[in-house]
Amino acid sequence: MRTVVFPPAPELLCWRVRQARNAALNAALDAPLLLALLVLLVIVAFSSGTEVAMLSVNRYRIRHRAQAGSGAARTLERLLQKPDDWLGANLVILAAASVFASAIATILAQRTGYPYAVPLTGALLTIVVIVFCELAPKIYAAANPEGVALHAAGIYRVLVLVARPALWLTNSVARGFLRLFGVARATAGPHALSAEELRLVVTEAAPVIPARHRQMLLSILDLERITVNDIMIPRQEISGIDVRESWEDILDQLQQTPHTRLPVYEGELDNLIGLVHMKRVAHELVRGTLTRERLIEVARGREAYFVPEGTALNVQLVQFQRNRRRLAFVVNEYGDIEGLVTLEDILEEIVGEFTSDPATVTHKDVHTERPGVFIVNASATIRALNRALGWQLPTGGPKTVNGLLLEQLETIPDSGTMVRVGNYEFEVLQVGDNAVRTVRVRVPAAPKAVLPVSRAP
């Protein structure tokens, strides 16, 4: 049996006093170290969270708040323009805080005297850093990037100013290393959104923008993709006055026309004289004093305006405004008139057809024979049919139904010819003047996608 020998009573008392004094001294020394460790962990958490916040913050909201007078937003905007500065400051304090926290934790573990204290403390510190200093702050910052970034902007501004020499050194080394790989200095540009990104922004703004306004914004963005050829009135459908016609026919046309402007030509449309505005001749027309010579004189006073085919609608809209015009003739590379485009046509691409009933948008081109079956004027444009009826006919090639069918058949078809375009079945009903005039279209119940054109068996 082991015998425990205690020191004499006076010596035991002194020993216990020394032990208590050493414990108190250790506690006094450990308290500042524990406090320093806690502060360093807070710094690590701050650095991790703010980095995520500043990288994911909405720059346009920050710019808006800065323009509205927010000092914190202005500071943050300046910081974001030089990401290498604030990122360098962030990494410096993150690295320093992590190193010192690890060192202090090791010292505290060694002071306990336990043989496995150091590895256990290292494992515990790793868990604490991952959960409380990395994961939790980053999740919070990702959920509230604007608030976190605005509160951190002032601190980073001070850090960048104080650590300027160290940042210059570290950034210079980093830039030199990046130059080896052909990477230039990281600078924040204007961050201009592309048209596709703007479309995505407008689409995702559904909760705050009414559907009607959202569709108008998307239509404005689509103007650059649409040309005058897509919306023009084809040459064959242009209503004009041929001065070679009998005067009685010309007067009847002037009295019955629904248009405010009419082209005046001699013999054929390419021999265009000019345009006549109905208000210029209305009084003379009512009084019966209008003559052929007067009509030609008025038409020559307003020269026709020509635009090349393929002009984008956004460009043409500006041209209409710049030239104070509302109507233009579309010409091909040979100078032949292909069609007519008006300011109203472009505006309808933005706001929709100027009609109170969407069902009447294409009433002159489409008639319902029975559910799912339509009689269609083959001169109708594919875009107009798709937009008005929700069809999904291919728009990458010909502009009209007639052109689509002729492209597929590669010949002028006879009446009764059947053609399938994706899920849509076309039956030619009427052919005339070397073109398809009328077709019957059988529409699928729920078209899903535009399929390649193929001839029906």
Image (spheres, rainbow, N blue to C red):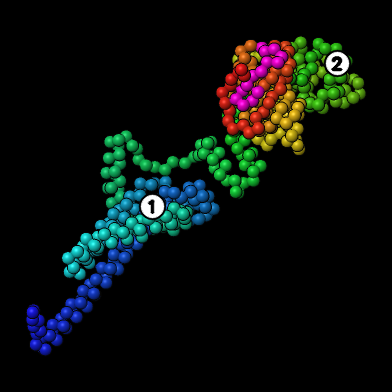
From what the image shows, is residue 105 above or below residue 416?
below
Q: CA distance from mark 2 to mark 1?
A: 78 Å
Residue 405 visible here: yes
Q: Are marks 2 and 1 in contact (CB under 8 Å)?
A: no
Q: Which residue is mark 1?
A: 51
The percent position of residue 391, horizontal first and vertical second, equals 65, 30
Q: Which residue is rendered at x = 66% and y = 12% of the image?
A: 412
The percent position of residue 31, horizontal first and vertical second, equals 27, 72
| Amino acid carrying mark 2 in the image | Asp
Residue interval drawn in magenta: 412-425
From what the image shows, is residue 372 above or below residue 433?
below
Decide which of 442, 430 is in the foreground and name it: 442
Decide which of 444, 251 is in the foreground and name it: 444
- Magenta-colored stretch includes residue 22: no
Mark 2 Cα-neighbour bin, 10 Å: few <14, some 14–19, many ≥20: few
Considering only order in the chain, which callout, 1 or 2, is on the residue closer to the N terminus?
1
Q: Pick out the residue farthest to the right.
A: 287
Q: Which residue is mark 2?
A: 249
Judged left or right of residue 65, residue 112 is left
